[in-house]
Image (cartoon, helix red, strand yellow):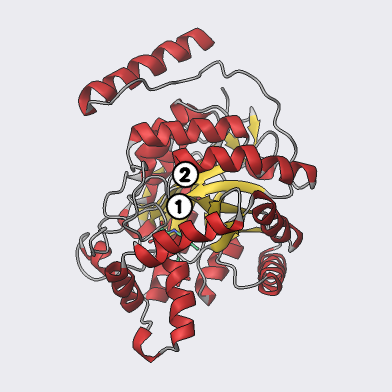
Amino acid sequence: MSRFDVFREAGNPMFNDNQLKLGIFGPNVNNSCAMTLAETTFKPNFETNVKIAQMMDKAGYECIVPVARWRGFGGPSNFNGECMETYTWASAIAAVTEKIYLFCTSHLPTIHPIVASKMISTIDQISKGRIGLNTVMGWFPKELEMFGGKKMQHDKGYQYATEWMEVVLKMWSQQFFDHKGEFFEIKDGWQEPKPVQSPRPVLINAGSSKPGMNFAAKYTDFHFSFLESMEQAGEWTNHIKKLAWDEYHREINTFTTSFVVCRPTEKEAWDYYNYYVREKGDDEVTDIICQLFNIDTASQSADFNKKFRDNFIAGWGGWALVGTPEQVADKLIKIAKAGVSGTLLSFVDYLVEMPYFNENVMPLLEQAGVRIPVKKEKSSKEYIFTGEMNHSAGVRDVAKEVAVSLASSK
Ligand SMILES: Cc1cc2nc3c(=O)[nH]c(=O)nc-3n(C[C@H](O)[C@H](O)[C@H](O)COP(=O)(O)O)c2cc1C
């Protein structure tokens, strides 16, 4: 496949006609987005991730965004401590899916841009143009200090990110180039393969500071942020679009994150929410993370603490989609109507709760016209795990099954 065969906007789920695009956030880390000790079948392992990704592929979701994390935050859950590295994760998930768009999430200070650009180009070939990059600078000092020295000062981090991105864009688009900057010196830079996608893989960023939003506006296709209200959703979208257009003559869209508790009745949904957030919530790790964000919970009002902490425990501060299928669909439709392109979802138990969402909420979104019904077709590369997985044997089985399915699909 030549690099000119796939144009980003043609056939790319991130640019499809669905007014509300849907993805998930963090299936590669333990607890995903919920700081809870509630029981779940969810595991941040490859076996579970393949099942989730294939289920999403069939249901027509647009994307998966993994979390980049190098160590846990502590507490009894050691929230996000177990984390599959995201370039290798994306490469493997690409081989067992067909349509869904995948992202690597990368702390730019931890990787040389030449290595990153080549890995993304390689995954682009494996996935046939379905890989993008979530650029993060990192905010958790302890994990970045593992790489030596101190975490880069915040604004300096975005200067570094700008130069990093320039090198990657040159690697993807030019034949031979020299680069001499503050952070990198590249002599006769050259790379093959180039990305399959043209002009380049989709870039996303979730910087909320001024330099962060400026970086997003300059380079990326989607700016990610948390929602505070529908008014704020509209204002934020207008602001970043205007910034990208006025400063860089570029188009950009917005995307948010939400957590889902969807049940046949409102009472069942809130009962479960109360159970996993209030009864089983990991308060210890929530305190640790609040301290990292310099949120002095002792000085806040009880009401603030309850709302803020509850949302944190429930889904990393995402927008609450709690209720019946009709109520959840209604909240999602409002996000789309506010001008936000889509939302990543998180569930406490993906393999149990996501099928219910797919069967009961998706049709309502289609009826409302914010999503187009998915054509039901049998996958030619269906991949099914059988039985319990012994780690090393399981991985060999995966390689064998993928090889067989790819050979039979030729
Ligand atoms: C949807 C979303 C995903 C993010 N993913 C990660 C991640 O995986 N790893 C990480 O260290 N930070 C992650 N962040 C944090 C942001 O990259 C960013 O550092 C944060 O929003 C603060 O903005 P600033 O860098 O402009 O100060 C994420 C933020 C959001 C909203």
Numbered-mark total: 2
| Closest to the observer, 194 or 91 | 91
Q: What amino acid is labelled 2 in the image?
A: Met
User: Is disc 1 in contact with disc 2, using a CB cutoff of under 8 Å?
Assistant: yes
Q: Which of the 4 quarters of the picture holds residue 278?
A: bottom left
Q: Which of the 4 quarters of the picture holds residue 404?
A: top left
Disc 2 designates what residue?
A: 171
Q: Split into 4 quadrants, where in the image is the N terminus?
A: top right
| Closest to the observer, 39 or 52 | 39
Q: Which of the 4 quarters of the picture holds residue 305?
A: bottom left
Label 1 SS: helix
Disc 1 designates what residue?
A: 167
Q: CA distance from mark 1 to mark 2?
A: 6 Å
Residue 373 percent coordinates (x, y): 73, 34
Crowd around label 2: few <14 · some 14–19 · many ≥20 (10 Å): many
Label 2 SS: helix
